[in-house]
Amino acid sequence: MGLDRVSSVSLASAREKAAVQFMLLDAGKDPLSERRAAKSGDTQTFGAFAHSFITEHKRAWRNEVHRKQWHSTMNQYCSTIETCVSTR
């Protein structure tokens, strides 16, 4: 399975990409099938899931600061997943 062109990816980035693929294998998933599904749009992104989770549960959070903290936490700690949660 190719991760990217040699000239366009650093060694550190290639190692990170490979680690993700090995985690999928360890979880019993096929990395190639996962990639194809993601490209075809059959899967939900983490950002979309987090946004829908926050939208569904924010009414139960009585404190406005707490609601804002969910967005802030997702953006701060999950931004490496390439999906920031909007504050819509």
Image (cartoon, rainbow, N blue to C red):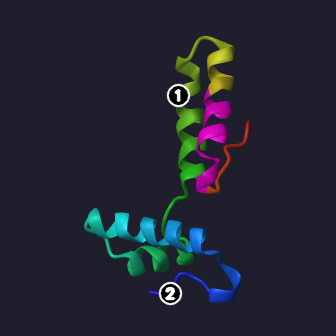
Q: Which mark is residue 2?
A: 2
First-in-chain label (2 vs 1): 2
Mark in the foreground, 2 or 1:
2
Q: Is residue 84 above or below residue 14?
A: above
**Which is more toward the observer, 65 or 56?**
65
Asked if the stretch drawn in magenta spans residue 77, the answer is yes
Count residues near mark 2 (Cα–Cα under 10 Å), then give few for <14, some for 14-19, many for 20+: few
Q: Main secondary structure of the magenta part?
A: helix
Residue positioned most to the top: 63
- Quadrant the N terminus occupies: bottom left
Magenta segment, which residues?
70-81
Q: Quadrant of residue 27?
A: bottom left
- The residue at 42%/73% (across/down) is 34
Q: How many marks?
A: 2
- The residue at 59%/83% (across/down) is 4
Count residues near mark 1 (Cα–Cα under 10 Å), then give few for <14, some for 14-19, many for 20+: few
- Which residue in the protein does label 1 denote? 57
Q: Is residue 1 above or below residue 18?
A: below
User: Could you give the CA–CA distance between mark 2 and mark 1, rounded to whole angstroms?
Assistant: 39 Å
Q: Position of residue 26 (x, y in %)?
A: 27, 65
Q: Which mark is residue 75?
A: none
- The residue at 36%/69% (across/down) is 22
Q: Is residue 2 above or below residue 78?
A: below
Q: Quadrant of residue 8?
A: bottom right
Asked if the stretch drawn in magenta spans residue 66, the answer is no
**Which is more toward the observer, 22 or 6?**
6
Q: Position of residue 14 (x, y in %)?
A: 55, 74
Q: What amino acid type should be assigned to the residue bearing mark 2?
A: Gly
In the structure shown, which secondary structural element does the residue marked by tag 2 occupy? loop
